[in-house]
Image: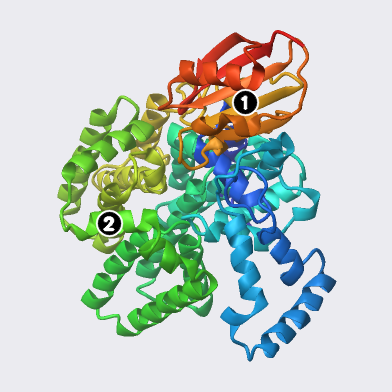
Amino acid sequence: MNLNKETKYMRLLMGLMLCGIVLLLIWSGTKKEGFHVDELYSYGLSNSEYLPFMHMGESGYDVKDWMLEFGPGESVADLFRNLVRDFRILKECDFRFRESILYQKYLTAQANSADTYTTTWVDGQEYRDYLAVSESNRFNYASVYYNQRGDVHPPFFYLLLHTICSLFPGLFSKWLGIALNSMIGVICLVVLYRFGKENLDEACGLLLVISYGFSCAFVSSVLFIRMYMLLTLLSLCHLRNHMNLIRREGAMTKREGLFLGLITFLGYYTHYYFVIYAIGTALVYGVWAVWHRKWKPLLQYVCTMAASALVGICLWPFSIRHVFLGYRGQASLQALSMGQIFFEKVKIMWNQFVPMIFGKGEWLFLLLLLIMLISYWVLAGGRKISYGKAALLVVPGGLYFILVSQMIPFFSDRYIMNLFPAWFILFLWTAAGLERELRKRKEIRIRLPILPCAVCLLFVLFHNGIVHTPGYLFPGGTDSYPMKENTDCIYVLPDYDWNESTDETNLLAQCDRVGVVYESNLAALKDDKVYTQEDNILLIVRNGLDTEKVLASVNETLFENALREVSRDAGASCTRIWLKTTAP
């Protein structure tokens, strides 16, 4: 394939920009010192062996044991041997699964793997095993699938994170998650470049990459080790697929149909909110197809989307329980079933959204967008404007933004990260269209797109990830604590609360022993261990408890008043107190 000089130059610049963006991500990653609790759950749900959430103490026969006895075992030979035995067991009870020993033992294993009231000392290694892949659990996708069954999200992101972590068994590091998100982010930028090239020109594609890639919005999406960077990529691919359908007047080859179905399935397999975005794009395409009487392409489209939904439910049937019976799904559906749109929530989410893109120049950018839109429409006279494409940029994102702002459990920009690229596209697209109309009226010798370059420069100057601080760095977090050797940790919970020690997993994983206990049951941790003088004790007290009272009780009940306080600090959900023993 022969490439002209301009194309080679653009691709070289694209490569240089990607290198610069990757360096920015690495530099920003070095400043990330802590984790949001959900980031720790990303590692735990991906890497723990049939243990979605940490439980309190010994559990006996659990799901891991059941999988070894009746499931895939530890090898391919075990898998086939267990399948033969499972078939014989089912045959003996006339294939009544609920009456079989398979089902009875599974109920026992599942109950024992749940969060229980049992409290005892456990080795800190258990917390390391929760975060990092053990040698016996490498590439164990059945475990990831099982763990997500007990969570509220689909498993695709966790399968990818488990794959990365399986290459480095025994290692827990922020860099594994950042590396995965960086790879996804680079792919997203390449798709954005292709999007600009297909719908505008190659130069505008490069400007889109620069505007989004160097923004705090992009850097924050990568640094937050959750599925939202992946959701952004799939939402962008979904938008691009529909733009291509409208550009080609609805024509869809088998390959394009498979890709559309695959992206739709993977989006659903990543986050349930993707379905809202997919419904928005489907509505726009459906109206466009009916308006232009594209009946055959519309039928192909409906069949493709229906097949994607069917495959998704077959491969991940737990979505039905998550959405309709899970606590998070029921709360979201209840919010929507009220039939009211609370614009106060939309306003709060908007205030979360705009700083990530515009920084402190939101009104300048919005005024600029309004002026460009009006000027473009007036100069074009309404002609040669693809209203179908314009609707694809605005309607799905707007519908998603309004509905998600009503459904989310708490207000956070994470839930609308997948909309960031569409905003950059909207600005650059409007600027490119306006310049095209201006060039028709006056000869401009400069081939470079002047207005898109100016908009790109504004984005980079106002809120880039170089000068400005991106989100999700958590300075002073647990990554910044130098844990001393021979440290035991006592984690005290309010009575009958669920085990939230996972919040501090990165810290607990560095301890020799960890005791998670309810306030009223401190004596459960009393054992025969003899502490020498100046041994290290870390006491973590959940918010809502009387910290001084708990400290006094621990000192009296477990250490016979032989503790002295060294320092303390406040975490987001707890108080950490560093102690030393004062007597042998």
Q: In the depicted view, which residue is nearer to us: 449 or 265? A: 265
Q: Where is residue 287 in the image (x, y as percent from the top left)?
A: 24, 71
- Amino acid on which the number 1 mark rests in the picture: Asp
Q: Which corner quadrant holds the N terminus? A: bottom right
Residue 409 place in picture, x, y as percent: 34, 45
The answer to whether residue 136 is above or below residue 252 is above
Residue 78 location, x and y as percent? 82, 71
Image side of residue 245 versus residue 291, left or right? right
| Quadrant of residue 28 within the rendered picture | top right
| Residue drawn 38% across the image and 65% down it | 242
Q: What kind of colouring is applied to the model shown?
A: rainbow
Q: Write the residue at 33% across / 37% down.
A: 353
Give the position of the C terminus as an image quadrant: top right
Q: Name the residue under label 2.
A: 390
Q: Give the numbered dot on residue 479.
A: 1
Label 2: state its secondary structure.
helix
Residue at point 17%, 51% (across, down): 341
Q: From mark 2 to mark 1, how far is it between C-alphas?
A: 45 Å
Towards the viewer: 54 or 432: 54
- Mark 2 neighbour density, 10 Å: few (under 14) some (14–19) many (20 or more): some
Q: Please, is residue 243 above or below residue 568 in the view?
A: below
* Mark 2 / mark 1, whichever is N-terminal: 2
Q: Which amino acid does label 2 sit on?
A: Ala
Element under label 1?
helix
Q: Nearer the viewer, mark 2 or mark 1?
A: 1
| Residue at x-position 57% and y-position 48% | 53
Viewer can see residue 446: yes
